[in-house]
Image (cartoon, rainbow, N blue to C red):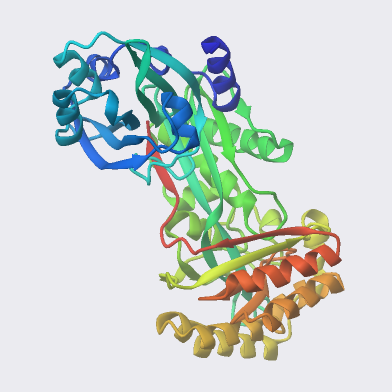
Amino acid sequence: MDFAYCLKEIENQVGKLSPVQKILLGTDGSITQLLESVTGHQVSVRTREQRIVKADAVAAERLSVAKGATVNHRIVELLDAATGEVLVYAKSQTPIDRLEPEFRDDLMRADIPIGKIIERHHIESRREILTARVAPDDTGGIFSVCKNEPVLSRQYRIIHSGEPLIFIEEQFPFNKFLDERRVIVRTPSRIHLTLLDMNGVLGRVDGGIGIALEDPAVHLEAQASSSLEVHCDDVQTAALVRRCAETVLTAIHAGGSVSITVREYFPAHRGLGSGSQVALATARACCELFGTTLSLAELARMAGRGGTSGIGSAAFDHGGFIVDGGHRFGPGCEKTGFAPSSASKGIRPPPVLMRHDFPEDWHILLATPALTEGASGMREQEIFRTCCPVPLEEIRTLCHEVLMRMLPGIVEKDLDLFGMSVNAIQDLGFKKIELSYQPHEVTKLLDTMREAGAAGAGMSSFGPTLYAIGDTGLQDIEHAVQSYLKEIGGGTTLITSARNRGAAVRTA
């Protein structure tokens, strides 16, 4: 194995490795002793799983044994004994027939690191490094990290008397054992069900309803830097991160700059709130990095979000099912005209009137046709100007629908009631206007979702992403949607769930 090449490939994927990380990935000695040197604490072992199995073809090749040979399969956590923090997750496979009885007893009956077992039994051995890489996190969430954070892995064999004695794979998070402090932020996305009042006769305007989603998500990492750097393979997202970081760093008088790496994002202008989440994540990361504490309202104002709908900022703050109360409207008020968030800069996010957990056994199917992106920029502003105010009677009907069916449906976990309300609001108020600007293929896709069994289906924001809500059978609905998408030129689907908590923010 060309270890230098492996390290270069890892750094191409996730960024610069620290010297400690390189040593942990490449050592041919005891990783337990290295961890004790790095942490200054003893390392203990906690066995998660141990069982005797028959070697499959992969294990047989790794261990140079016959397929079906008896192998001890062991999964352990290496912990900082002083703090209880999991440092390394390790899986091992050992041919039973190659073990002396005393060695086998220690391996199978005691929580002892393998390196210390080898030392205890005076076994002459060497470590043969097989690979080092970025690997999928299959640890079951044992590390205190955000979802989808990169995990580093190495595989090696312990060779004794010319034969493999043990095969081991060890994993630890990329954001562990770093040289510099790093802030990691992972945000939800959201579906925006509708704007409530685009009439304004009562002196308030906007108001919104939405649901925070677990996926898709924005995931970025920030660390101090001599100059502002943004690493992202999407030009539009990178530009937004840069603009937001410049604004925030100036506003908080940071006295330094940042390097931001965007590891996960979703496309803008698809109806899922990408811009709000990227901007808020950037603002929060910069503030955390420089020790500045700001309220969500202040973050949103600096990031230029929440001027019409407050669903994106509320989803970032605390997740769940959200209803916001809009803005004061009229001469001398914070809003004097009808405009989207992109044209409502400097306006505070609206108050959250209701936040409720979305039922955990309800799931959400997202479908995004490969069509023109949702309205944005000048086109979106023109739609607001020409189509508002919405007739008052429609606003009254919409608010009646939300108050007497949608909200009770959430609180009582009545999926049929909630779904009927979702279907009804597609033909009311500003949502009806938003749908009227969509091609026929989008409205036909709504029919496809309902006919396939969705309790409720609608369009998020200005689309083109549609959503279907159900508790069972979403796979069948997804298959029907995928068949229709193929007919109209393609698109993507995703079954996700609501996120009943806000963005995950941590420091490594």
Instruction: Give the left or right position of residue 490, taking residue 364 as reference.
Output: right
Q: Which quadrant of the structure image shows residue 302?
A: top right
- Identify the residue shown where x is 49% and y is 59%: 315
Q: Which quadrant of the structure image shows residue 118?
A: top left
* x and y percentages locating residue 50 in the rendered image: 26, 41
- Identify the residue shown where x is 56% and y is 31%: 261
Instruction: Give the left or right position of residue 134, taking residue 244 as reference.
Output: left
Relative depth, front residue between 470 and 377: 470
Q: Is residue 38 visible?
A: yes
- Identify the residue shown where x is 43% and y is 82%: 413
Q: Which quadrant of the structure image shows residue 156?
A: top left
Quadrant in which the C terminus appears: top left
Q: Is residue 144 above or below residue 269?
A: above
Q: Is residue 99 above or below residue 407?
A: above
* x and y percentages locating residue 22 in the rendered image: 43, 14
Relative depth, front residue between 117 and 460: 117
Q: Is residue 234 above or below residue 223?
A: below
Relative depth, front residue between 488 and 54: 54
* x and y percentages locating residue 354 in the rendered image: 44, 73
Q: How many marks?
A: 0
* x and y percentages locating residue 454 in the rendered image: 62, 79
Q: Is residue 373 above or below residue 59?
A: below
Q: Is residue 176 visible?
A: no
